[in-house]
Amino acid sequence: MSVFTENFLWGGAVAANQCEGAWNVDGKGVSTSDVCTGGSHTKSKRITRTMEPDTFYPSREAIDFYHRYKEDIALFAEMGFKVFRFSIAWARIFPTGMEAEPNEAGLEFYDKVINECLKYNIEPLVTISHYEMPFALTEKYNGWSSRECIDFYVKYAKTLFNRYKGKVKYWLTFNEINAGTMPMGNFLSLGILNEGTTDFNNQVDVPILRFQGLHHQFVASALAVKAGHEIDPQCKIGCMIAHMTTYPLTCNPDDVLKAQQQNQISNLLCGDVHVRGEYPHFMKRYFKENNLEIKMEPGDEAILKEGCVDFYTFSYYMSNCATAKADASISSGNIMGGAKNPYLEASDWGWQIDPKGLRYTLNELYGRYRIPLMVVENGLGAYDTIEEDGTIHDDYRIDYLRKHIVQMGEAIEDGVELMGYTPWGCIDLVSASTGEMAKRYGFIYVEKYDDGSGDLSRRKKKSFDWYQKVIETNGAAL
Ligand code: BGP
């Protein structure tokens, strides 16, 4: 017997800049993600505007979902997907972000993607902004550090709500909005390019700009939620947070307090603003002690209150530990590292695998917010090998996903309201943190490599059949 609700949304997730490619066709403008290099031969992700010979710009071709969406969505349908999470590339709709009218060809592409999903009864779950914005907004305004971006974003969001009204029921305003609380979020999430920054992974950090940018995103998100509800009262709009589950490394009260503080800034700040419509109590002291004077306009507080989200979604890959000690050994994470947890194994990229942490997190979140939750990213980035007979035995991935699904089931039995599950990178795509193809998440393998080679053909991995069975039995056969 399954503990998952009858209408549980099983599916998968991708993002435009990591899968579409076709970066300069049909009127699309340059996006912040298009100026980042990546791949093993560039060692780290650098930001460069020019097209350097022999350099791999991952988002420019990616896995060419733009031209292969039909084949890919057919494969998702074959697995039995009930939902498909994807993002819209802002620069396809407003090439510089500043145009008065949208680019019709860009909208038509998403008409086709959405219609293709609906053909198979797959609910589209659309992220309005997933780690990218028109690069022109970085050049002219230094991204979200400027208040002007609020109006550009709201115009963009309204365009989408009007166009896809009645077709798209589920929306997310920003991917992993809490990236803005961390230095890595400068360019990735906020489009902020501080003077001297060329290396994506090692940016010049100006915290006041990040927190100011985050405030602008909060206001933009709330205005979008309000507008979305007015345009289509049936639609549900959620937030999306990279959940950084953080345990104290020891029961030393100093470690416990450290873990609490990290949790407050990394997770709860964004969750509280989105769900409760106000800044949480601890931010006053944090802003003061860090000399952060955020400029807010008189109407902002009311806007945040009027734009609370309908559901809470998050990504969950790993957990971390916090310690007050300065010399602890450090693990790596997607946007934040922490002290190493001696009880957990890690992925090849040092992400500490913690399925029980997902049950813990779901309970914590539901207890605090009491609105439906959804796990919109989870999965194992791994090196896959094609056997001589062409098969791919990704048992490690099945094992990871199975253990997390078991814990979701436990959380449901604990009383948590969980709407759905969309594992990340349901088809192999470009990694956000490294820019590489070698770090794969998919149920579907894509022949694309970091030197730019590969014919982009798709093939099913062992996990494809496994996940198909999971969905078919509504999570009973794991
Ligand atoms: C999240 C992002 C995704 C995705 C994922 C996996 O932080 O929302 O875009 O890429 O992490 O991370 P990576 O690609 O770095 O392995």
Image (cartoon, rainbow, N blue to C red):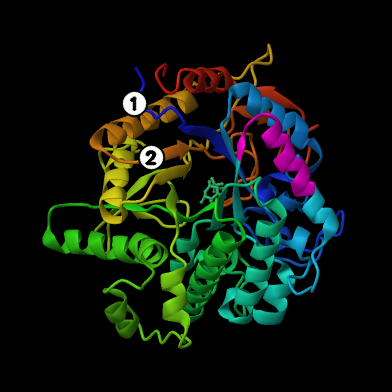
- Name the element at disc 1: loop
Q: Position of residue 208 (x, y in %)?
A: 46, 81
Q: Tell me if residue 280 comes above or below residue 459 in the rendering.
A: below
Q: Relative to the observer, which residue lies in front, 340 or 226? A: 226
What's the residue at 59%, 81% (across, down)?
146
Q: Residue furthest left?
A: 252
User: Would you name the residue on which mark 1 appears?
Assistant: 3
Q: Amino acid at mark 2?
A: Leu
Q: Relative to the observer, which residue lies in front, 275 or 365? A: 275
What's the residue at 59%, 34% (across, down)?
426
Q: Which mark is residue 418?
A: 2
- Name the element at disc 2: strand
Q: Tell me if residue 358 comes above or below residue 284 in the rendering.
A: above
The N terminus sits in image quarter: top left
Mark 2 surroundings within 10 Å by alpha-carbon count, few (fewer than 14), some (14 through 19), many (20 or more): many
Region rendered in magenta? 109-123
